[in-house]
Amino acid sequence: MQLSLTEDQAMLAKTASAFIAEHSPVTRLRKLRDDKDERGYSMQLYKQMAELGWTSIPFVERDGGLGMGMAGAIIVAEAIGRGLAPEPYLASVILAGQALSLGGNEAQRSEWLAPLIAGDKVLTLAFQELGSRYEATHIKTRAEAAGGGYKLTGQKVQVLAGVRADAYIVSARSAGAEDAREGVSLFIVPANTPKLKVTRQYRIDSQNTAILELEGVEVPASALIGKLGASAALLDNVLDRGTVAIAGEMLGGMTETFERTINYLKERKQFNVLIGTFQALKHRAAKMFIELELARSATLAAARALDEELPDARQLVSIAKARASDAYVLIANEGVQMHGGIGMTDEHEIGFYMKRARVCELSFGDSAFHRDRFATLSQY
């Protein structure tokens, strides 16, 4: 497997990085946070990303996509991670978009996927529940037949880009016990559906997340994605893509943190000596670089394995997320510490990366979860 960028991918990486650096510096996230912006991101900027073709990258040509797969999507995700841009690329394009692309029928793709790719609508996947930990099929939300459609009752938490989204793809249990793989279904729920309540969650990374409360929400039969009770495999597939995408974003964050820290080591003096000349700090910087490059190789391998549908793709996804989680937390911690006292202040931007590292580490499974999953999938 080739673990380097093609010419087209290298050009995309360069243009995406330049765009984010110009339009979404960390100061922008700080302002959105301080202003308590309801949406937490800009639809205008997101539309520009769509016009650049970013939102069409992972989709097949049938859906109006560019067919660049996850290997292309993680390049955009990495650029987003470098600037901590809060736009809903992961939530809408990767999670909801892939659910529609892989499992939706022609009518659903026409109604929802086309405007999603155009950047006109934001959809997201509501799959996490209290107590579910990282098991996506541990679902208490129920789906019952009602009036030719379905009635959904339950609660979803940590819904990415959930505030002011246009629609939600909600996982619900139409049959079986809470932790059974059989009986899992996915439904499209428009944001204006009666008895749907959306509440903003506030996290340390200042990103848009929400709690969804479904109090007998009624949806038509056409809202069902795929076959009733048979969406566990589809959900697994979508979440593997989301896991690789967030690993790509983590690459961007840890790369930016590493570069900022190295630049600081080259500028900061103690007793008229550059601290970057201290051997102990050199060793720690070398460790950061090694972990960064290992995470990069693992993430690229996982993305390409998903695109090529390799038999060990899920194992490679777990390797990528485990390595990215450990590496980002390590590099963020070291970055804050090597910046000294100023690194601990809110005024300095390095702390924003440490906060995002903590959230990303626990999203889509932490390193312990993915090491265990790798062992299980490998039949250890």
Image (tube, grey):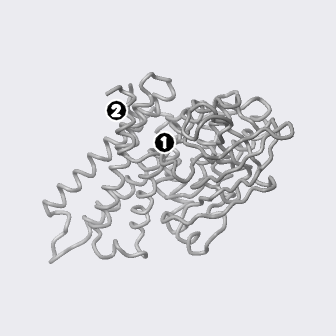
Q: Secondary structure at mark 1?
A: helix
Q: Which residue is mark 1?
A: 243
At horizontal 55% and vertical 39% (from top left) the residue drawn is 137
At horizontal 65% and vertical 46% (from top left) the residue drawn is 141
Number of the label disc, if any, that sits on residue 78: none
Mark 2: which amino acid?
A: Ala
Q: Secondary structure at mark 2?
A: helix
Residue 78 appears in the picture as rendered: no
Residues packed near mark 1 inside 10 Å, few (<14), some (14 to 19) or many (20 plus): many
Residue 319 appears in the picture as rendered: yes
**Quarter of the figure with the N terminus:** top left
Q: Is residue 34 left or right of residue 190?
A: left
Which of the marked residues, 2 or 1, is nearer the chain's N terminus? 1
- Quadrant location of residue 111? top right
Work out which residue is located at the far right of the displayed protein and give it: 147
C-alpha gap between disc 2 and disc 1: 17 Å
Q: Nearer the viewer, residue 323 or 252?
A: 323
Q: Is residue 351 left or right of residue 22?
A: left
Q: Nearer the viewer, residue 174 or 256?
A: 174
At horizontal 62% and vertical 52% (from top left) the residue drawn is 156
Q: Position of residue 246 (x, y in %)?
A: 48, 46
Q: Position of residue 45 (x, y in %)?
A: 65, 57
Q: Position of residue 11 (x, y in %)?
A: 50, 40
Q: Nearer the viewer, residue 112 or 214?
A: 214
Q: Is residue 203 left or right of residue 275?
A: right
At horizontal 57% and vertical 47% (from top left) the residue drawn is 90
Mark 1: which amino acid?
A: Thr
Q: Is residue 268 above or below residue 214?
A: below
Q: Which residue is mark 2?
A: 375
